[in-house]
Image: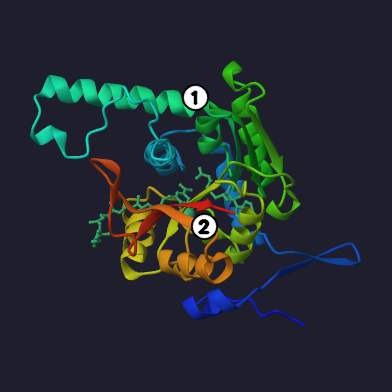
Amino acid sequence: MMFVRSRVLRSATVWKQLDVCSRFTVGRQTRYKSTDASEDEVKHFQELAPTWWDTDGSQRILHKMNLARLDFIQRTLRNQIKIQDPEVYVPGFNYKEFLPDYVCDNIRREVQGSIEAGLSGRQEMSVLDVGCGGGILSESLARLKWVKKVQGIDLTRECIMVAKEHAKKDPMLEGKVDYECKALEDVTGQFDIITCMEMLEHVDVPSEILRHCWSRLNPDGGILFLSTINRDLISWFTTIFVGENVLKVVPKGTHHLSKYINSKEILAWFNDHYDGQFRLLDLKGTMYLPMQGWVEHNCSDIGNYSMAIQRLK
Ligand SMILES: CC(C)=CCC/C(C)=C/CC/C(C)=C/CC/C(C)=C/CC/C(C)=C/CC/C(C)=C/Cc1cc(C(=O)O)cc(O)c1O
Ligand SMILES: C[S@@+](CC[C@H](N)C(=O)[O-])C[C@H]1O[C@@H](n2cnc3c(N)ncnc32)[C@H](O)[C@@H]1O
Ligand SMILES: [Mg+2]
């Protein structure tokens, strides 16, 4: 049965129902890779690979985005830490309005120290970065003291080669990060953290990526971090009209509105497939503003967004 895959089919309703697999032939064997990327997407990123680590080059927006998404990831993880030490005073009210600054600073320092101790005290975490590109996020995660190792995968071979070469420049990354050019469905093992940043809007069947991420998440609290773009006029205006054609800060042809995915669609998909097995830890809209960089806002139904979903069982 031929699956018809066209951009028109990727409307909201179809996205939820279609389990469309991309099909390609290797020799005489026809293989289905549900987590595949189309040739034009891979070709696009092949061409960008050489300048991936030029922070003023084609990927400069991803480099700027990296600061904000690391904050999102670390804040989400810190919020998972419950302060056990009775000596640490955790105010139950907005103490900053009632207490002098020096007291507030002490409280903040004590709480922060206890959270860091909590994070460091936990077993180091294993991370899978899906669609890692040249490794911008993979490297940042690998440098965190509570991360044991980052496995970065991508279907663009040139990106993986760039990622490997760049990681060699930092001895601190020795043994902390590993890259492979492979499809998600070929990844074995389970991970405490899986990141899927700015790649869902580039794949043929995003639900397949989510499904394969889920099955590789540690069932005892593993966290999936996503960032992608809502399918709306403002997203088209900011990310394509302004981003690619006016400010030209995003390579032309990077995005296609029809491939964008609404945060509501992702949550509906998780409710349909894993009802009662997951917890939404955080969902924030994010927007790039030239003078400020990437800023968070609470309108996660418009434009870019970041999402953290925890697997409970
Ligand atoms: C609360 C809310 C959303 C209100 C909306 C109201 C409104 C109309 C807001 C418009 C905001 C505004 C005035 C914007 C000005 C124009 C502007 C600064 C647009 C930003 C352009 C831009 C940098 C978009 C980012 C696109 C993006 C998602 C980049 C990440 C990225 C990068 C790359 C790459 O570099 O190769 C590849 C990718 O796949 C990416 O996702
Ligand atoms: C915009 S880049 C994002 C890179 C990285 N996640 C980051 O945010 O810095 C998207 C990456 O996803 C990769 N990609 C697209 N579809 C993929 C798929 N089905 N499986 C694995 N990687 C994919 C592309 O090759 C590209 O490197
Ligand atoms: Mg993108």
Can residue 260 be seen in the rendering of this structure? no
> Which of 241/229 is in front?
229
The amino acid sitting under disc 1 is Ser
Q: Mark 2 or mark 1, which has the lower sequence index?
A: 1
* Res 278 label: 2
Position of residue 177 measured from the top left corner of the image (x, y, whole percent): 63, 30
Residue in the picture at 54% in, 54% down: 199
Can residue 234 be seen in the rendering of this structure? yes
Position of residue 125 measured from the top left corner of the image (x, y, whole percent): 58, 33
Position of residue 290 measured from the top left corner of the image (x, y, whole percent): 26, 44
The quarter of the rendering in which ligand 1 is drawn is bottom left
Mark 1, residue position: 120
The amino acid sitting under disc 2 is Phe
> Which of 48/10 is in front?
10
Seen in the picture, residue 233 relative to 201 is either above or below; the reply is: below
Few, some or many residues within 10 Å of mark 2 (<14, 14–19, 20+): some
Few, some or many residues within 10 Å of mark 1 (<14, 14–19, 20+): few
> Which of 274/248 is in front?
274
Seen in the picture, residue 71 relative to 14 is either above or below; the reply is: above
